[in-house]
Image (cartoon, helix red, strand yellow):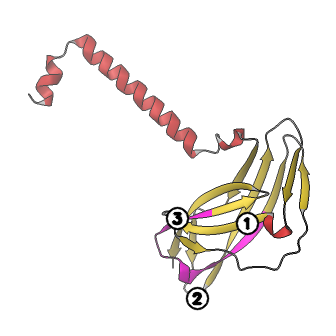
């Protein structure tokens, strides 16, 4: 029995029920996908990190490195002041880059860092913001490939995907 014969053998009520079910499924899947792709879910965690950066990085032929501008925001979504603490000043912002499969690509060079505990307060509803330029080594990247920037900002983890192209 082919699909056309099966469909025409159904009565009108059954076909209408099928259409309704298909429409509800499409609506639910679309809504879940849209929410998952937005920052909506992250904004309800107690401390939410947001990473703003270009989605596509273009390496010029003449340069071996390109600076990737990053804007980091940490928002306190609680009703109380959040106490932020990291073991050293070098741990306020930590980052590394992987392929989408999780293979290591690049991280910052090791730094000598004073062993001073860093503390800060983030009032309820407020956010902390930092800007950072990450030097990308062109020899570590492949054209047309997507990568993942992993960031830890005041102990909170976040990531952002980006694509690399060459001129």
Q: Quadrant of residue 79?
A: top right
Q: How many marks?
A: 3
Query: Cα distance, mark 1 to mark 3?
Result: 17 Å
Q: Is residue 48 left or right of residue 10?
A: right
| Residue in the picture at 51% in, 73% down | 165
Q: Nearer the viewer, mark 2 or mark 1?
A: 1
Q: Is residue 81 visible?
A: yes
Q: Is residue 142 left or right of residue 21?
A: right
Residue 137 image label: none
Q: Is residue 93 left or right of residue 52?
A: right
Query: Cα distance, mark 2 to mark 1?
Result: 29 Å
Task: Identify whether 156 is placed above or below 147.
Answer: above
Q: Is residue 60 visible?
A: no
Q: Nearer the viewer, mark 3 or mark 2?
A: 3
Question: What secondary structure is found at the residue carrying circle 1?
Answer: strand
| Residue in the picture at 76% in, 59% down | 153
Seen from the viewer's position, the closer of residues 141 and 57 is 141
Query: Cα distance, mark 3 to mark 2?
Result: 29 Å
* Residue 75 at x, y percent in the picture: 79, 47
Residue 62 image label: 2
Question: What secondary structure is found at the residue carrying circle 2?
Answer: loop
Task: Identify whether 126 is placed above or below 2.
Answer: below
Q: Residue furthest left?
A: 1
Range shown magenta: 131-149
Tell me, yes or no, whether the two marked residues, 2 and 1, touch with CB atoms within 8 Å: no
Task: Identify whether 129 is placed above or below 68.
Answer: above
Magenta region includes residue 114: no
* Residue 34 at x, y percent in the picture: 53, 40
Quarter of the image with the N terminus in it:
top left
Q: Which residue is mark 3?
A: 102
**Of callouts 1 and 3, which one flags the residue occurring earlier in the amino acid sequence?**
1
Q: Which residue is mark 1?
A: 94
């Amino acid at each position: 029995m082919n699909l056309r014969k099966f469909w025409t053998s159904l009565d009108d009520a059954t076909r209408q029920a099928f259409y309704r079910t298909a429409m509800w499924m499409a609506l639910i899947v679309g809504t879940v996908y849209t929410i998952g792709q937005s920052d909506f879910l992250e904004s309800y965690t107690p401390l939410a990190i947001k990473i703003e950066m270009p989605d596509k990085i273009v390496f010029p032929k003449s340069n071996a490195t390109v600076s990737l501008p990053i804007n980091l925001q940490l928002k306190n979504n609680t009703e109380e002041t959040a106490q932020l603490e990291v073991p050293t000043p070098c741990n306020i912002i930590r980052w590394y880059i992987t392929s989408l499969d999780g293979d290591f690509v690049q991280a910052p060079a090791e730094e000598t860092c004073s062993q001073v505990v860093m503390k800060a307060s983030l009032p309820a509803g407020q956010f902390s913001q930092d800007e950072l330029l990450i030097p990308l080594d062109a020899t570590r990247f492949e054209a047309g490939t997507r990568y993942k920037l992993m960031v830890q900002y005041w102990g909170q983890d976040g990531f952002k995907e980006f694509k690399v192209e060459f001129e």
